[in-house]
Image: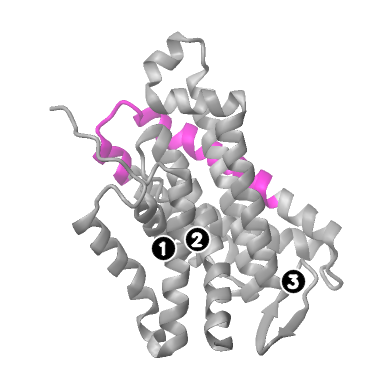
């Protein structure tokens, strides 16, 4: 029983990371019907910003104040990067066919990955902990402070986003823009500004997830975002892309599945789980667990 609880805890921690990253995918898709494949690479840039800021601050004796500075700096930097990506790459193509935007998103992703290798180098870097670390033993279950941190921060970020989207004027504007750009503009809503803010918020969430992953695994590299980005995309599709609670549930389900398969002897199939889930969802419920099927007019 202790072993099962251990796997559940590991899955909850991993699923929280996928959920936070998936929220960025689902926000952008909900407002633009665009799959921002560069989102995983923004996650990677957030980890690198945290790496350099943490090193500049010393990083030998992690404190909560220092961790707050590192995390907020990374989130702000990636929010700015997200806004720049939207304005420079996606806004000029907003009225073009979706395939054009999809290819552009893939191009932006490849550009960020290769630019990161050029700037930071291809070798992995050791990420010095920015949060205080500890280990607890309860009933044969090992609980790492990093796991509690990931779960706690994930819950706070997801709850904050839910409140912003459904309880504020900004969220109301975002929902209006996602419904219809032209009608929202006629109502006086600054559509371009709302879309930029959406990209910024999603990128900030990705940066926070990048710090949490780097803190847990003590390593950053320019290809870090590829694996996590793809799995978070699967989580968003699983939950129903464009649906915020669905992204959270999709991330948790995927995290639990990976953890249980790895824990019971199938670690070699861990990465295949995500794409197996994606195939099954696309076959049996293409709209996702919480998504709605909307017929397309032709």
Q: Image point 79% across, 53% down: which residue?
A: 69
Label 3 with label 1: CB-CB less than 8 Å: no
* Image coords of residue 195 (percent x, y): 49, 30
Q: Tell which tag, 3 or 1, sits nearer the viewer.
A: 1
240 left or right, relative to 16: left
- Whether pointer 2 and pointer 3 mark residues with C-beta atoms closer than 8 Å, the reply is no
Q: Identify the magenta region.
A: 74-103
Q: Earlier in the sequence, mark 2 or mark 3?
A: 2
Q: In this view, does 33 lie to the left or right of 13?
A: left
Rendered residue at 47%/10% (across/down) = 187
Q: Dots 2 and 1: beta carbons under 8 Å? A: yes
* Alpha carbons under labels 2 and 1: distance apart: 7 Å
92 inside magenta stretch: yes
> Within 10 angstroms of label 2, few (less than 14), some, or many (20 or more) residues?
many
Among all residues in the image, which is located at the extreme left?
298
- Which circle's residue, 2 or 1, is located before the other in the chain? 2
Q: For the residue carrying disc 3, how many other residues have a C-alpha within 10 Å: few (<14), some (14-19), or many (20+)?
A: many
Q: CA–CA distance between discs 3 and 1?
A: 25 Å
Identify the residue shown where x is 39% and y is 20%.
181
**What residue is disc 2 on?**
18
| Residue 133 image label | none
- Residue 129, numbered circle: 3
- Quadrant where the N terminus sits is bottom right
**Element carrying mark 3:** loop
Q: Is residue 263 above or below residue 9?
A: below
For residue 56, which quarter of the picture? bottom right
């Amino acid at each position: 029983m202790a072993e099962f609880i251990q796997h559940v805890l590991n899955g909850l921690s991993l699923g929280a990371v996928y959920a936070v990253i998936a929220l960025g995918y689902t926000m952008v898709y909900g407002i633009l019907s665009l799959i921002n494949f560069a989102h995983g690479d923004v996650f990677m840039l957030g980890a690198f910003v945290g790496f350099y800021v943490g090193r500049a601050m010393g990083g030998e004796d992690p404190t909560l104040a220092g961790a707050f500075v590192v995390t907020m700096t990374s989130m702000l930097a990636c929010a700015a990067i997200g806004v720049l990506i939207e304005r420079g790459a996606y806004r000029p193509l907003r009225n073009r066919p979706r395939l054009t935007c999809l290819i552009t998103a893939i191009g932006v992703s490849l550009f960020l990955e290769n630019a990161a290798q050029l700037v930071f180098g291809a070798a992995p870097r050791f990420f010095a902990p920015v949060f205080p670390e500890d280990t607890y033993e309860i009933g044969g279950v090992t609980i790492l402070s990093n796991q509690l941190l990931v779960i706690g921060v994930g819950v706070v970020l997801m709850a904050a986003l839910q409140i912003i989207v459904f309880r504020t004027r900004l969220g109301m504007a975002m929902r209006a823009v996602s419904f219809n750009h032209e009608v929202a503009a006629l109502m006086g809503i600054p559509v371009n500004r709302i879309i930029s803010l959406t990209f910024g918020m999603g990128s900030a969430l990705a940066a926070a997830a990048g710090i949490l992953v780097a803190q847990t695994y003590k390593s950053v590299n320019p290809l870090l975002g590829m694996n996590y980005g793809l799995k978070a995309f699967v989580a968003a599709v699983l939950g129903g892309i464009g649906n915020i609670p669905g992204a959270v549930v999709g991330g948790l389900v995927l995290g639990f599945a990976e953890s249980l398969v790895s824990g019971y002897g199938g670690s070699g199939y861990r990465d295949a789980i995500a794409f197996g889930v994606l195939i099954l969802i696309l076959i049996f419920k293409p709209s996702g667990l919480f998504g709605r099927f909307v017929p397309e007019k032709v």
